[in-house]
Amino acid sequence: MGADVELTAQTKKTMITNAREVIVVADHSKLGASALYRVAPVEAVTTLVTDDQADPALLDAFRRAGVEVVVASANPDESPSRP
């Protein structure tokens, strides 16, 4: 890892450690994907906001880990779901 990536990772870790809530906003293509570094375990996340193309099995795994999942629809006439 380069110095910039390490600094970014450390900054995010510090922010998460000091936060009351951790809200992740990620579209379906990011869920389950590999990254250069791990910032925090899923248990540190309080809310995940994603799109309606996300794999339901992945969303269930987040819910089982205690994460509130909000699914935003691409259709502006539909409200976000919070199953």
Image (tube, rainbow, N blue to C red):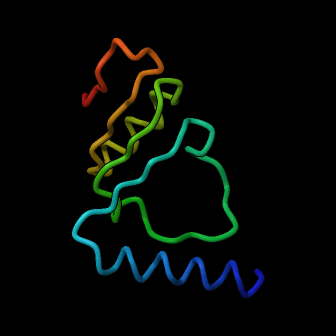
Examine the rendered structure and indicate whether residue 9 appears above or below residue 44.
Answer: below
Q: Position of residue 6 (x, y in %)?
A: 65, 83
Q: Nearer the viewer, residue 18 or 58?
A: 18
Check the image and name the residue furthest to the front: 76
Examine the rendered structure and indicate whether residue 4 appears above or below residue 29.
Answer: below
Q: Nearer the viewer, residue 46 or 19?
A: 19
Q: What is the quadrant of residue 76 in the picture?
A: top left
Q: Position of residue 16 (x, y in %)?
A: 37, 73
Check the image and name the residue furthest to the left: 20
The reply, left or right, for residue 67 in relation to residue 26 is left
The reply, left or right, for residue 10 in relation to residue 2 is left
Q: What is the quadrant of residue 75 in the picture?
A: top left
Examine the rendered structure and indicate whether residue 22 appears above or below residue 51.
Answer: below
Q: Point out the image quarter for the N terminus.
A: bottom right
Q: Residue, x 63% and y 38% (percent of image)?
A: 29
Q: Point out the image quarter for the C terminus.
A: top left
